[in-house]
Image (tube, coloured by chain):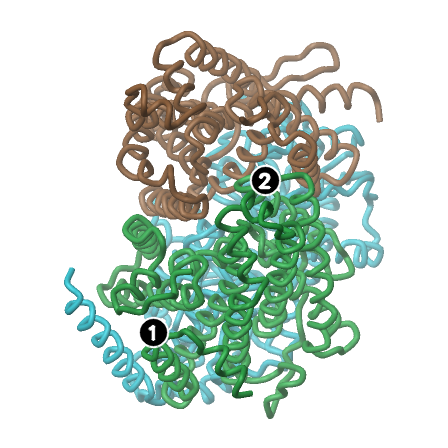
Amino acid sequence: MPFDVYLNVAVSGILTGLVYGLMALGLSVIFGVIRVVNFAHGEMMSIAMFLAVVLFSVFHLDPLIMMVPIAAVLFVFGYALQSGLINPFITRPEHSQFLLLVAVALIIVNVLLIVFGPDARTVQTSYAFDSFQFGPLIVDASKVYAGAAAISVAILLFVFFRYTRIGIAIRACADNYTGALVVGLNVKHLYALTFGIGAACVGAAGVMMTLIVDVTPMIGPTYTLLAFVIVITGGLGSMAGALLGGILIGLTEALAGLLFTPSAKSMFAFGILVLVLLFRPQGLLGKRAA
Amino acid sequence: MAAIAARLTDGLPRQTVVALVVLLAALLIAPWIVNDYLITVLILILYLAFTGQAWNIMMGFAGQLSLGHALYAGLGAYISAFLFTSYGIGPWLGFLAAAPVAAACGAAIGFLAFRFGVTGVYFAILTIAFAEFARIGFDHLTIVNASAGLFLPVAQFSHNDLWRLRGDPTMFYYVILAATLAALVLCRLLLTSRMGYFWLAIREDEEAARAAGIATFRYKMFAVMISAVVTSFAGVFYAFFYNNLFPEQVFNISQSIQMILGPIIGGVGTLFGPILGAFVLTGLAESLNDGLTAFGIDMPGAEQVFYGVCLLLVVAALPEGIWPWLARRCGIAGETT
Amino acid sequence: MSSDRIGLNRRHVVAGAAAAAASLAAPSVGRAQGGPLKVGVLLPRSGFEAGIGQDCQRGVAIAGPILKSLGLPELSIMDGDTESSVETARARAAKMISDGAQCLVGAFDSGQTLAIAQVAEQNGVPLIVNIAAAPQLTEQGYKFVFRNFPTAAMILSDAFTDQKEVFASVGQSPKTVVFMHVNDTFGTAMSKGINFLMPKFDMPYKILDEISYDPAARDLSVEVTKAKASNPDALLVVSRLNDAMLITRELVKQRWTPQAIMSMGPGWYEDEYFKTLGKLADGPLSFAPWFDPNKKLAQQLEAALGKAYPGVNLNTNHVYTFEALLVAADAYKRAGSTDPKQLADAIRATNITDNASIGGGIAFDAKGQNMKVKDGGMQNRTGKPVVVAPKEAANAKPEWPLKPYQSRA
């Protein structure tokens, strides 16, 4: 096969991976800091996707512009979900959290089904089908925008957690829950904030996703699983890790699809996950848990 | 016989034993009283009670969270169905072939996880990964028809053939009832055995258990393998009851989730929790369906929304599950292991 | 909550269960005489197949008045949702029969349909399959299962025949194709069939590469790049809706327009495909079960659907679900009884010639399969599929080649 095919597939795989990474960033925050097994992650993203679709079809608001307001809505949703429902569960065993979030996911999927019906929805922007050509290389424009968004969101999160007082306080909670309580941090509020931030990230990701895939109420579960694979591969709580994990998974799937049969490509993603779990359980860029 | 009976009932309050006997009697005569639909529902309940108990051995007793139990059920289903369709080998012999494979898979996953220190959520994700491997693998395994599906011939039968598991729902009902009872007895025997105590010690505090001289690795491996073998029988039953298998369906993560809802709602680590949970959840789903129909609501998705809300309320209000709470309410002590 | 309350509740539950059991102990199969026939319709209306299940349901919703206008007796429809799961499908089928259903219709998905078929057979209640292509359904020796839908092999044979007719009509044919198919039940059955059947039809093209992809695929860029690298004249596809849209988008983004896209299944002719892709939706050919636009009943259905659901084009889902009800009503009229056994005998003797789908009408062979049903060849034209083959059902001439995607405004 000619070299330019490999080049196209590799670039496309990396960009797809960045989009996956954007989606996984939110989970990295939620799972990495609060340690809540958010099995409703993909479903939360589908809420944002439907919001973007509705805003576009009714008011013709471009998804790229609506990214921030929709992220804000998801922030409120996440904050309320954590402080109202999940907070009592943070000290409960994982299987209990798991059940709670499976129930949340079930409710989200079916409320979306009742409200929007089962059909695939999409936004039809003027640039939906654009691509850039550089010699033999053709690059999907939507994926480039989404990839850029992923990197910006990751940088924002990094700055937030590293340099702001709230960010530092949240990291303190993650590192030492009891210690944070002792020094008088409002842990409940901080956790709700964190969940809100995670939800805002996945909201932004959902808006970008509408440029690339069609949304149906049933789209959530596959993305939930994918997000876990990426976050664990990349390393919990590491923003760069989530992006790297996404790129690694995206690139592997793309090359596996090219060299082997595409229908088996997600096997390779799970293969990477298993190897990481066994040989580098903290993830590629995660730090060793204390 | 008497000794086993004594060991089974030893330490159980009298009212529990009486309640059990009454429930068992009711279940035994059920096919004479209820119609085909309720038998179908009871089969579904008992199937979930059975798989719930199997999962509970690993999670409830030994504290290892598996979210990939569809793997073992799927192996049982596919191996027994393959042997039946290709060589005419009956399901019971098929189970004998499937059980070691399931045990070996469980052992392999357990070995990797426990040797490399994969625990908690990470262990759960690892089990999902292996179930997904199996799903995608079987999707491409042409010997069992890949994603086109494996179909068991549904011959026109004039009588129930227990040996080949061909027959009417009543026969399947008694098979799964017997299996559920057997699983209950097995769980009880395991729990009161030496191994059972070791498991509980590992579940409560693995470090302490190791310090006390318990070979934690070995006993965790036993838990995974026993759980895998028991679950694989559920797969055999599934294959012969539904008669068609698709990797997308049997290895799906939703199957794994379905298996663990009952025990979590009923009470993880308890003997009766998984059974009670299966009754409550399936009963809930069916009555929601009935209720919505009665109110003339024909809205796809509404039933699942109510179901989700109920799950949420139960898990929020009764974190330990329904059975421990009920047992306390009814004054049955000692069943909150 | 006091413990007294709990005790009471528990007793209530037990008493209630006993009462329910007693009331349900009555003979399970309803034998009401006269009145409308009770038909239980089971479709995957939630879960991952919700889209198609709800689309099929539209065929049920418009059926009443049309059946009446044909002089057929009234049906009392019981709606059921399989939730896209085999287990639920089986339980719902048993429930409907215990609630008095005298005939079942369903269920789009082969696995769910097979689960329902077992219940129907055990209870001696006829099941009329609306859509399901797995050959096993009518190979089990069932006496109460009838299918008015082609098997995978029939779909393929007709597809090859219709393709040749299209090639002859436009005077061109592709010499090479890449075969892309979804790796699910239908896709795999078609892929197996193609290797077996294609030599018999002496097709002008050869298959350069076969690419199978995941039904839950989120991204098909690699798959399309791989197909493009083989540089075939045309794409041969077996897909679903979601992947049909993904493939089209990738074709546009990767700036590649093959001579033709020839689908042998759903996806490309569906409303969502048109709505989502607009002008980019025009051109692909679908070879699939379809309705004959020249038949009176099809026109009647089209009108009724357009009135009830503005903007929804009539398609296979509506037509075959409607025809399943047509078979039930027609058999009920001839049987003059709601007795399931007599109804099954009447269905077996069905001979409807004025139907809506392409082909010679509806009649069942000894296995319960309608062998007279035929596929059509459709082409997407300005937001709507038109029939271009076979000649007797065509209402337009095929266009060839595909208009380049880049030149569409």
Describe residue B63's horizontal placement relative to residue B213 as left or right: left
* Chain letter for the residue marked with disc 1 in the picture: C
Mark 1 Cα-neighbour bin, 10 Å: few <14, some 14–19, many ≥20: many
**Chain in cyan (letter):** C
Q: Which quadrant, please, contains the C terminus of chain A?
A: top right
Work out whether residue C156 or residue C217 is closer to the camera in this orientation and state it. Answer: C217
Q: Residue A167 in the image: x percent, y percent?
A: 39, 15
For disc 2, the marked residue is C243
Q: Residue B174 in the image: x percent, y percent?
A: 51, 83
Disc 2 + disc 1, Cβ < 8 Å: no
Q: Residue C391 in the image: x percent, y percent?
A: 64, 54
Query: Which residue: 74% across, 34% down?
Result: A256
Query: Which residue: 62% across, 50% down?
Result: B213
Q: Earlier in the sequence, mark 2 or mark 1?
A: 1
For disc 1, the marked residue is C75
Which kind of residue does numbered mark 2 sit on?
Asp
**Chain in green (letter):** B
